[in-house]
Image (cartoon, rainbow, N blue to C red):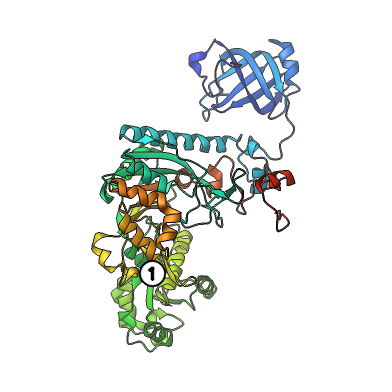
Amino acid sequence: MLKSHTCGQLDLHYEGQRVTLAGWVHRRRDHGGLVFIDLRDRAGVTQVVFNPEHAKEAHDTAGDLRNEYVIQVSGVVSRRPSGTENPRLPTGEIEVLADEMVILNAAKTPPFYINEDVEVDESLRLKYRYLDLRRPKMQQIMILRHRVVKFIRDFLDAEGFLEIETPILLKSTPEGARDYLVPSRLYPGSFYALPQSPQQLKQLLMVAGYEKYFQIARCFRDEDLRADRQPEFTQLDLEMSWADEDDILGLIERLFTAMLQAVCPDVRFLSPFPRVTYDDCMLKYGSDKPDLRFGMEIAELNDVFESSEFGVYKSALAEGGCIRGFSAPGCAEYTRRQLDELGELARSFGAKGLVTVALGAPGQKGAPLSDLKLEDVRSAVGRYLTLEQVSEVAQRTGAQMGDLLLMVAGPQEMAANTLGQLRMEMGRRLGLAAPDFLAMAFVVDFPLFEWSKDEGKWEFAHHPFTAPRAQDVHLLDSAPGQVKARHYDIVCNGYELGSGSIRIHNREMQQKIFGLLGYGPEEAQERFGHLLDAFEYGAPPHGGIAPGIDRLVMLLAKAPNIREVIAFPKTQSAMDLMTDSPSPVSEAQLRDLGIQMAVSPVKE
C-alpha cells in the first residue's frame, strides 16, 4: 500500500509515530515559512505541516501544490500547539510534520469546488460525476448506501434467506411499464427485455423449493422520470413460500426497525408501523402513499350539504360525486391573494374551484369553537352556509377558531387527488412534517383491477400475478372492480418505498385473471407459459415484496431526489451527461443486428 494509515484514523494515540499518508489536497495555506495542507481521503482529513527547517526539499515541493493534487506524505504524528486544535475533526488534535512528499498526480482546476459544500448546477455535477462523487458529502451518502445494503444482506441471511441472482436478459412480458428491449444478433428480429423486476423468476424459485429468496436486484423501466424515479434502479427483491401477509409485513417491519437502529440511530420513526387500508388512505389523505408525519385528515361531507342550495355542491352530489375537506391550522388570516393562490393550485390538480372558510374573527384564535358566530365566518360562498353546517365541518375536520377550512366538490378521484395535494402543500407551508422523522406504514387491501378509460377494459392495479382476497373471488365475473387484492405497500413520508403481494400459485386462477385482463388462452400461453406450466408441478403458496433501495437511502440521507444516492444516475430526461448517452451506434453494429433506422437519431 502507498499509505500506512487513512486520513481519518490518526489521533493522540499515534503521537510520535512515523506514518505515510496518501490522498488529495483538500486545502493549502501558506503561513510565511510554514505551509499547511489538509490531506483528504475517503476516511477523513489530516493536517500536514511542511517546515523548511525540518525538511527543506519537501517544503519546496509543497509550494507547487494546488487543490486536488494527489500526493504521498511521510512524517511524524505530532500534537498540535495549544489553541490550534480543531474539535470538528476526529484528527483535530494532531498534525503530521512532513519529512518526505511525492506528487503522484497533478490536477486541473475543477469546474466546481470539491472542498466546499456549495450549491452547484446539477447538470454540471452529472457531467463531472467522478468529481462530484469525490466531495465528502457524496461519499458519506455512498457509504450510507453500502451500510444499508450490507445490513439487509446480513439480516436476511440470519433469517434463512438465500441470495440468488436472476438473469438480466429476459422475455418481454407486460408488467406495468414499457420494457427496455435488447435486439438479438443470433436471432434477427427477436428481442430480449431488461427486467422490470425479477417477478416471475422469483415465483419460479418458489416452485423450485428454495422457500426464502432475496436479491439486491437491478431493474429497468422505460417510463417518464421524476424526482423519485430512474430508468434503472435497485430494489430488495424478496419472496417467501408458506407465507401470508402477516409473515411478510412482520419480516419487513423487523428488518427496517433493526436497520434504522443500527445504521441511523438518530432517526426517529413510528413503531409499530401502522396498517391502513387503501380506501381509508384515499379518503383521509387523498393518496395511497400518505405522509403520516402530520394530521390534517380529509373528511367526507356529503351528508352535511345534502340539502344545500349552493349550485356546485348540488351538482356534485347529483352526479354521484362527493364533497370533502380538511382544516389548515392557524390559517384563518390568509389574505385574498393567498386564498387565490390556493384556488389556482386546486384548479391545476383538476378541481373546478376551492371553497375556503375562515373560522373566527381576528383575535379569536384559540377561542372555543362554541363561541363561533355566523358573522365570524368568512367565505366567498358564505351566503350559502349555515352556522350548523360550518360547525359540523369544523368538528369533522378537527378545526379550531383561527383555522381555515378547505373544501372541494366533484368526482371522487379528482377530489381525493386535489385535497391530497393541497394537504401536502399546506403541510410544507406550515412546517408540520418533521424532517428527522420517518413515518413508515403499510397500506393494505388495494383494488385488484383498475378500469382503463382509454383501453375500455380492466387492467391490473399491481401486476397480473397478485392473488385476490378469498372472500372476493366470487365477484371476479360479476363485479371485478370490487375485488380487493392481497396486495400491500410500505410507504414513508409521502413516498412508496415498496410493493408486494401474495401471489397466485395455481394455473386455473392465473388463467382466470389473464382472461379478465383480455389475454386469451393462446396469448397467455405464449407470454406466460413458463409460469403457467410450472404451477402444474406443485407450486407452494407464496408471496413477497420489493422495497426500493434508492428511495430508502434518499429518505435516510435527507436527499432531495434519488439521483443524489445513485453513483451514476441519468438526468430527468434519461440522459447520461458524463458519457453522453444514449448515443448513435455504427452502421456495422446495426447491420449485425438486422436493424435499419427509420428515423434520424434525436439528441438532447
Query: How far across and down, in percent of the image, does residue 582 sit?
Result: 66, 48
Residue positioned most to the left? 471
Q: Name the element at disc 1.
A: strand
Q: Residue at x 56, y 28 (%)?
A: 42
Looking at the image, residue 132 sits to the left or right of residue 525; the answer is: right
481 is higher (above) or lower (below) than 14: below
Q: Nearer the viewer, residue 70 or 53?
A: 70
Q: Position of residue 34 (x, y in %)?
A: 70, 19
| Disc 1 crowd, CA 10 A, few/some/many (<14, 14-19, 20+) | many
- Residue at figure coordinates x 47%, y 58% from the top left: 176
Where, by quadrant of the figure, is residue 51 drawn?
Answer: top right
Q: Is residue 69 visible?
A: yes
The quadrant of the image that shows the C terminus is: bottom right
Q: Residue 110: x percent and y percent?
A: 71, 36
- The residue that disc 1 covers is 327
Q: Is residue 271 visible?
A: no
